[in-house]
Each structure stands twice: as structure tokens, then as C-alpha cells.
Image (cartoon, rainbow, N blue to C red):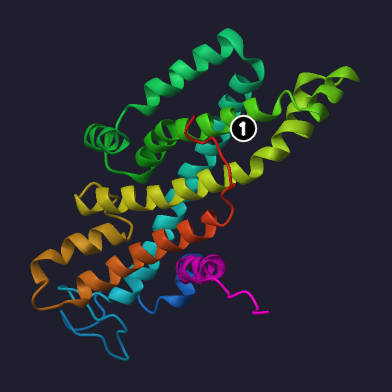
Amino acid sequence: MRAPRTTPRRYLPWIGIILTAFVAVPALFAPLIAPYDPFALAGPPLASPSRSHLMGTDSLGRDLFSAVVHGARTSLLVSICVAAPAALIGATVGLTAGFAGGWVDNVLMRITEFIQIIPRFFLAIVVLAIFGDGYRNLVIVLAISSWPVIGRAVRSQTLAVRDLAYVESARMVGARVPRIIVREILPSMWSILTVMTGLLLADVILIEASLSFLGLGDPNHASWGRLASDAQQYLRHAWWLAVFPGAAIVTAVVGVNLVVNDWRPEHSDVGS
């Protein structure tokens, strides 16, 4: 009898972990890994990759490797600062709506739908154009506008488990609603919360890079999007200026998606 063949799918999470580590480790230890200040003149302009400048230099002679490493820190920090409050708000709204039901559910879902139809990218452009291009404004607007998809997913899962036997048993023994939610319902949410938060992390990385590409990022911080934008006029003469920041964005997004995809429930009602 033949042994079952190993499917490539089982290796995808490990590939995702490796790709994510390529971004997370430099982000955490950027001051130690980067050989130069990302804004300091470190060599001749438009120098190709070499031992002294692993990814070459830009048009002003700044070290591209240092800029990419510090850009990883910027992307990671912004994405975490957006995903954490968005997950908290979404989980709170979803649990409340799904467990309470009735008019509470209707009101919260109408609010969720209203926020969900607002295009986040264009909302961020408007907010940054009016109130300034600092990352604080970006984090606030994205956190406020990104929780609905998590809230809907958590609500769907809450509706699926709130009438199960172990929840009913907790009600029958007199457990209070907060205790039922925290002890009985919330543990079943970790998988869906992990997946949705991970997808949001990848989404925010793309949004931040896109806004920086358009010139709406914080000019005081290194950003992959700004590096890619600066590379446009040198595409024919300095390929490294676009390739390395672009590869960093792809690595981060693909890595996070591969990791969280392994935690995706086999049968989920995320879209309901």
C-alpha cells in the first residue's frame, strides 16, 4: 500500500512563518541591524548593491538596506497599532450583538454596515490631507474604520455557539452574562479573531505603503511606499530602488496571509 503523498499545502504555514520572520526580526532590531541612519548620506548616489551597501544607495547616497529595515519597523508598528484596537472594538461589538440579539443586534449591525461601506483608503486620504500626514492620524482613522469585518465575523460565530448545550448549562447554573461571554463563548472566537486580525495586518501594510507612495506618509519615518515612489524616475538606471522595497512589501503581505490561512476554520460564516 502506498504511503500518502505529502501535499505542498502543509508546508505553506512554515513558508509564511519564514517570510514573516524576514520582516519581523529586522523590524524589532532595526537599530542594531541597519548599518546607517536611513536619512543619512552614506555613499555615492545611485550606487549598485555591494558589500558596503547591500541594497545599493538612492539618488542622494542614502543606504537603501537601512531604509528598508527601518521601513519594516514602520509598517509593523502601524499595522499593530491599527489591528489591536480594531480587533478589540470588533470583538466587543460582535459579541454584544450576537449574544444580546433583538434590537441591540439590529442597531449594532446597522452601525457596522454604515462604517463598512465607507472606503477606508479614500477616507484615509481625506483625513490625512485635512489633519496632516502623521501616522497618529492614519492609525486613528484606520482603526475606527477597520473593525466592522471583525465584528461581523465574531457576531456570526457568537450566533453559532450561544445556544449550544454548554452555554445553556452555564445559564442554568446561574452564571452571569459577562462570565458566560468570557468563559464559554470567547474561547471559541480565538481562531476567527486570529485569522481576521492577521488579514487586517496585511491589509494595513498595503494601505500604509500606498498612502506613502502617494506622498501622504510621515516624512520623518522610513517607509516602503515612499521608497517605491522615489524609485519611479530611476527605474531604467537603478533597478534596486524599486525591487527591494517592493519585495519587502510582497514578503510581508504574503507571509502574514500564509500564516493566518493555516488557522482559518474549515467551515466559517465570516461573510454572513
Q: Residue extending furthest top?
A: 103
Q: Residue at x 26, y 80 (%)?
A: 42
**Residue 248 versus residue 256: which sits nearer the camera?**
256
Question: As shown in the figure, which amino acid type bears the numbered disc 1?
Answer: Gln
Examine the residues drawn in magenta and state their main secondary structure: helix
Say left or right for 96 vs 48: right
Q: Residue at x 39, y 69 (%)?
A: 69
**Residue 86 versus residue 271: which sits nearer the camera?**
271
Report the span colored magenta: 1-26
**Residue 140 versus residue 8: which sits nearer the camera?**
8
Evaluate whether residue 39 shows in this view. no
Which percent across, then down, holds residue 258?
A: 48, 60
Label 1 element class = helix
Q: Residues within 10 Å of mark 1 (few under 14, many from 20)?
A: many
Q: Residue at x 56, y 57 (%)?
A: 262
Which percent across, then down, holds residue 257?
A: 46, 56
